[in-house]
Amino acid sequence: MSYQIRLFGDPVLRQQASEVTDIDGRLARIVEDMVPVLRSAEGLGLAAPQVGVQKRFFVYDMGEGPRTLINPVIEESEGEWVYNEGCLSVPGMSFEIVRPKTIHLRGLDLDGNEVSIEADELLARLFQHELDHLDGILLLDHLDKATRKQALRTWRELTESPARPSGLGGVGSLSLP
Ligand code: NI
């Protein structure tokens, strides 16, 4: 099955995803279908809700091949780091957002093994961004009121423009998923 990336405005992006209870062939097949979507969008990560699957997992690829994290939890976070963050569900837009610089994340991999990762900077950012998706949170929610208002206006212009460039989705390639 081929997935479409759900865009901002789709209610599925605002729902709380539920825990994965069975790490089975069905989940593996969903992941298999998500990887090419992530690749063709040239993103770094893709959370299940972004393809309409209300489950707590995401795929990511930092250049070392695709990996999956299931039921991820941030155990600790530290510091502050500013990064110009984008999202495949809000293509064409990015924002300077402050988040913790390092995190300790725990979860499960596709074999059901426990994973414990100390992540810094870009990887830490990716994890926090994807985890937000599992809770129905989008990067726009991290903006102050005025910036958010402006962002919503820009988004409306981008999506309502009849001359919307078909390659719009590729703009996210420089930023996070
Ligand atoms: Ni995103």
Image: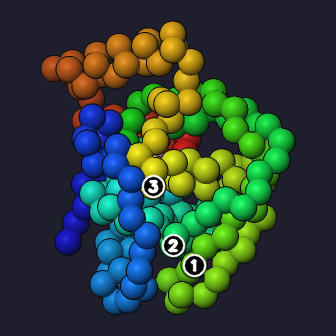
Circle 1 Cα neighbour tier, 10 Å, few/some/many (<14 / 14–19 / ≥20): some
Q: Nearer the viewer, residue 88 or 135?
A: 135
Residue 61 sits above or below residue 49 on the image = below
Amino acid bearing label 2: Ile
Badge 1 or badge 3: first in the primary sequence? 1
Q: Is residue 75 above or below residue 114?
A: above
Tell me whether circle 1 and circle 2 mark residues in contact (CB < 8 Å). yes
Residue depicted at 34% across the width and 22% down the height: 155
Q: Earlier in the sequence, mark 1 or mark 2?
A: 2
Left or right, residue 81 beside residue 13 = right
Position above or below: 2 against 126: below
Does residue 137 appear in this view?
A: yes
Mark number, residue 74: none
The residue beneath circle 1 is 108
Residue depicted at 63% across the width and 27% down the height: 96
The quarter of the picture where the N terminus appears is bottom left
Q: Quadrant of residue 168?
A: top left
Circles 1 and 3: CB distance less than 8 Å?
no
Dot 1 falls on a residue whose secondary structure is strand
> Residue 8 location in percent, x, y?
32, 36
- Using the numbered discs, state the Cα–Cα distance from disc 1 to disc 3 in whole angstroms: 15 Å
Residue at the location (52% across, 70% down)?
Answer: 71
Q: Secondary structure at mark 2?
A: strand
Could you say where residue 57 lies in the image, as x and y percent from the top left? 46, 67
Q: For marks 3 and 2, give the CA distance.
A: 11 Å
Image spot of residue 140 (x, y percent): 47, 29
Asked where in the image residue 64 lies, by quadrant, the reply is bottom right
- Seen from this angle, which residue lies furthest left? 162
Q: Is residue 172 visible?
A: no
Residue picked out by circle 3: 134
The number of numbered discs placed on residues in the rendered structure image is 3
Quickly name the residue at label 2.
70
